[in-house]
Amino acid sequence: MTKSKKPGETWKGHVSQEVKTRYEAKKYHKILVRVKQDGSDGFTRDQIESAAKQAGQSINQWIIEAIKSSL
């Protein structure tokens, strides 16, 4: 006998990618940040990742904090 699934669940009980995508679209705004690979923007992706790691934050958290501190 198989368990009945809730809408959006996969056969193992995990939420499907479609459900995650709909939730994310409803709850978040996406803002794309592009960084040139050659560093001609004045910094590189590695520098951003390193700064976030040193702060003990994800890149997203680190960028949000940087924006908040400049407002």
Image (cartoon, rainbow, N blue to C red):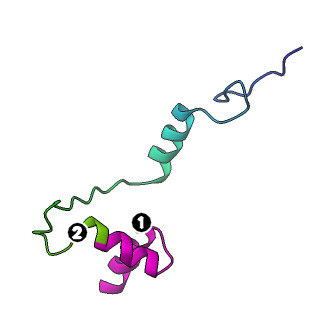
Camera-side residue: 12 or 28?
Answer: 12
Residue 51 occupies which quadrant of the picture? Answer: bottom left
- At 38% from the left and 54% from the top, the residue drawn is 29
Q: Residue furthest left?
A: 40
| Res. 60 mark | 1
Q: Per the image, is 16 magenta?
A: no
Q: Amino acid at mark 1?
A: Asn
Instruction: Identify which residue, 4 or 57, lies in the foreground.
Output: 57
Disc 1 secondary structure class: helix
Q: Image height check: is 9 above or below 56? A: above
Counting residues from the start of the chain, the first of labels 1 and 2 encountered is 2
| Mark 2, other Cα within 10 Å: few <14 / some 14–19 / many ≥20 | some
Pointer 2: what residue? 44
| Viewer-proximal residue among 22 and 17 | 17
Q: Is residue 14 left or right of residue 30?
A: right
Q: Quadrant of the N terminus?
A: top right
